[in-house]
């Protein structure tokens, strides 16, 4: 569906995005996660054709963004950062205007506008001026224009920015619903946002891809934590001798951290460690997998 290859964007001597590459398959919900200024918005602008790349390529559904920009944009629904809308228009007149820009035939507009308004829970506010709306309703209006033409790809830059907790929950539910019919890419610096709605995360740091992983894979730990009253040197030697253990270190009094070899079965490794402790007649106080969350991973990368 989406292929980004060696993407770079420079502003004079400053490199905002450096050699970024990734692929996104149909139906994925991908979170672009990173601190403010990491390069997330720049990547999204290049993906949507609003900003030219200095080098590299972006292909969407077999079409080159650089060579077939207008055709690509017809496949994309885009919510830019800070949700630019026309405050002097009502929601309906704004969506009518957006439908015209998309080239939607007049006879098809009423049904599509009605559906977009209903999906974003804007029915009660549809005839009100955008200037009178709260930040949450303006954000929903931005999402309504993004889904108006039923795009195959949704690119949402900070979709919950400025929303209150109730509005955030509503936006997350909407994004999850939209993901049933479209590939969704969300830019955010909020960890909970990614964990709540995404099935894959790409962490951007200093304009580069620092991590690209499915959340399920991210949660799988490659370490075992052992608590046992054992001689430290003897225990480290005993654990390292196990074929499934790549490395063993003392992590505190009566505590050891064991790193599994790549491809090792974590359950079998845990059983082997327990057998080794039992064979040495050491008391076993605890044996568990290391708890690994998106928060801990992000902290490791940021640090």
Image (cartoon, helix red, strand yellow):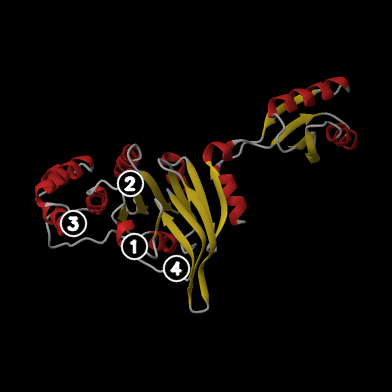
Q: Earlier in the sequence, mark 4 or mark 3?
A: 4
Residue identified by numbered label 3: 103
Mark 1 near mark 2, Cβ–Cβ under 8 Å? no
* Along the line of sight, the residue nearer the viewer: 51 or 302: 51
- Tell me: 108 left or right of 272: left
Marks 2 and 3 sit apart, C-alpha to C-alpha, by: 16 Å
Secondary structure of the residue carrying tag 3 is: loop
How far apart are the two marked residues, 4 and 3, measured between alpha carbons?
27 Å
Q: Nearer the viewer, residue 90 or 26?
A: 26
Say which residue label 4 marks. Answer: 53
Can residue 160 be seen at all in this image of the molecule? no
- Residue 29 position, x and y percent, is 42, 43
- Element on which disc 2 rests: loop
Distance of label 4 from label 2 (alpha carbons):
23 Å
Quarter that holds the C terminus: bottom right
Q: Residues within 10 Å of mark 4 (few under 14, many from 20)?
A: many
Q: CA distance from mark 4 to mark 1?
A: 12 Å
Outermost residue toward the bottom?
Answer: 12
Secondary-structure class at tag 1: helix
The residue that mark 1 highlights is: 69
Q: Which residue is mark 2?
A: 152
Label 2, residues with CA under 10 Å away: few <14, some 14-19, many ≥20: some
């Amino acid at each position: 569906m989406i292929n980004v290859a060696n993407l770079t964007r420079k502003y004079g001597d400053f490199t905002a995005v450096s050699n970024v590459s990734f692929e996104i398959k149909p139906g994925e919900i991908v979170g672009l996660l990173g601190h403010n200024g990491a390069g997330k918005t720049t990547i999204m602008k290049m993906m949507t054709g609003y900003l030219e790349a200095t080098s590299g390529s972006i292909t969407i559904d077999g079409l080159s963004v650089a060579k077939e920009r207008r055709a690509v944009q017809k496949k994309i629904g885009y919510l830019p950062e800070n949700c630019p809308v026309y405050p002097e228009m009502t929601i309906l007149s704004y969506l009518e205007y957006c439908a015209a820009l998309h080239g939607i035939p007049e006879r098809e507009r009423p049904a599509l506008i009605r559906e977009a308004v209903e999906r974003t829970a804007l029915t009660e506010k549809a005839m009100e001026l955008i200037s009178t709306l709260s930040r949450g309703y303006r954000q929903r209006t931005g999402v309504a224009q993004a889904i108006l033409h039923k795009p195959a790809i949704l690119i949402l830059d900070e979709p919950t920015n400025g929303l209150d907790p109730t509005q955030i929950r509503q936006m997350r539910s909407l994004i999850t619903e939209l993901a049933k019919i479209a590939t969704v890419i969300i830019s955010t610096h909020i960890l909970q946002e990614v964990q709540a709605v995404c099935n894959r995360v790409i962490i951007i740091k200093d304009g580069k891809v620092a991590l690209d992983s499915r959340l399920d894979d991210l949660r799988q730990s490659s370490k075992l934590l052992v608590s046992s009253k054992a001689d430290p040197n003897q225990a480290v030697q005993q654990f390292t001798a196990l074929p499934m253990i790549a490395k063993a270190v003392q992590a505190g009094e009566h505590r050891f951290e064991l790193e599994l070899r790549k491809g090792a079965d974590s359950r079998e490794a845990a059983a082997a460690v327990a057998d080794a402790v039992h064979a040495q007649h050491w008391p076993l106080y605890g044996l568990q997998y290391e708890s690994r969350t998106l928060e801990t991973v992000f902290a490791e990368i940021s640090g």
